[in-house]
Amino acid sequence: MTTAMTAHPKRDPATGELHFFGYGFFALYLTYHRLSATGTLVESRVVDVPGPTMVHDFAVTENHVVWLDLPVVFDAGMLGRGMPFRWEDSYGARIGVMDRAGRVTWFDVDPCYVFHVGNAREDAGAAEAGGAGHSRELGARPGEAIFVPASGATSEDDGWLLSIVTDHAGDGSHLLVLDASSLDSVASVRLPRRVPAGFHGSWLPDHGAMVSAP
Ligand SMILES: [Fe+2]
């Protein structure tokens, strides 16, 4: 494998396969990869996007992969001045639904940017994805949504979504807790520090186990 690798690979719970991708600053811009359950690279496929879009996350459903082809693009002129990406109005915005044969159907959407995808599902063979998106004007920025299953869960969305939401004005951050099945807000915990958007985390369940240092 010669591409970069996303921080957000997806493991298919039914097959054990790992789906992931890499994006680059130069053509070919986006490449999809699939690992078998035993860790062998079984597929690498270029996904045709028109330019160096920053693809941070994606979604996988039973039969499809969902791509976000959005107007935050690489700009070489910004190298050395922080993140070398900028909003590009002319780029447009598309969501792509790729089937297992690699055929992608693109849908134009209103320009926005989505860092993280909360979930995706299929209804009658069609894929639908929900993400933590924001336009340039929105003040609060939701971060990556972490799914926490309820103890004794009986369905796959029985649990909560946790996301750190940062006020762009810099006035601290909140840990937002949503019911994962309804997306109703359950709690909002004010954090004493501002946590930058895009900061990643994991949920570690406390099963009462003691962890000791080696
Ligand atoms: Fe992320």
Image (cartoon, rainbow, N blue to C red):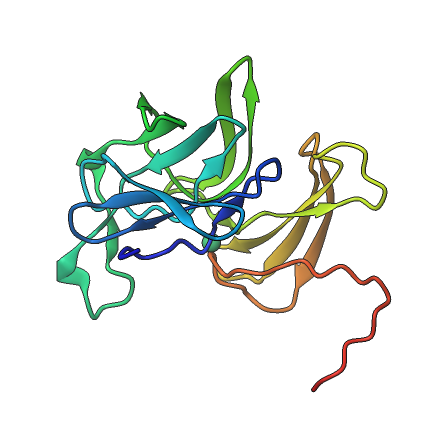
Q: Residue at x 76, y 82 (%)?
A: 212
- In the picture, which quadrant includes the N terminus? bottom left
Q: Is residue 149 left or right of residue 145?
A: right
How far across and down, in percent of the image, does residue 13 sit? Answer: 61, 39
Q: Is residue 94 above or below residue 54?
A: above
Spot the residue most to the top. Answer: 124
User: From what the image shows, is residue 182 above or below residue 35?
Assistant: above
Q: Residue furthest left?
A: 77
Q: Left of 99 or right of it: where is 167? A: right
Which residue sits at x=85%, y=42%? 152
Looking at the rendered image, the quarter that the C terminus falls into is bottom right
Relative to 154, say whether 169 is above or below.
below
Q: Residue at x 49, y 26 (%)?
A: 63
Q: Percent from the top left, x then y, of residue 94?
A: 31, 29
Q: Position of residue 117 (x, y in %)?
A: 50, 40
Judged left or right of residue 208, residue 14 is left
Image coords of residue 92 (percent x, y):
24, 31
Visible residue check, residue 36: yes
Q: Nearer the viewer, residue 159 or 152?
A: 152
Residue at the location (48% across, 45% down)?
A: 36
User: Which one is nearer the viewer's eye here, 179 or 191?
Assistant: 179
Where on the picture, by quarter, is residue 113? top left
Q: Is residue 157 left or right of residue 11?
A: right
Would residue 110 be seen by someone viewing this image from the given angle?
A: no
The number of discs equals 0
Residue farthest to the bottom?
214
Where is residue 53, by image quadrant? top left
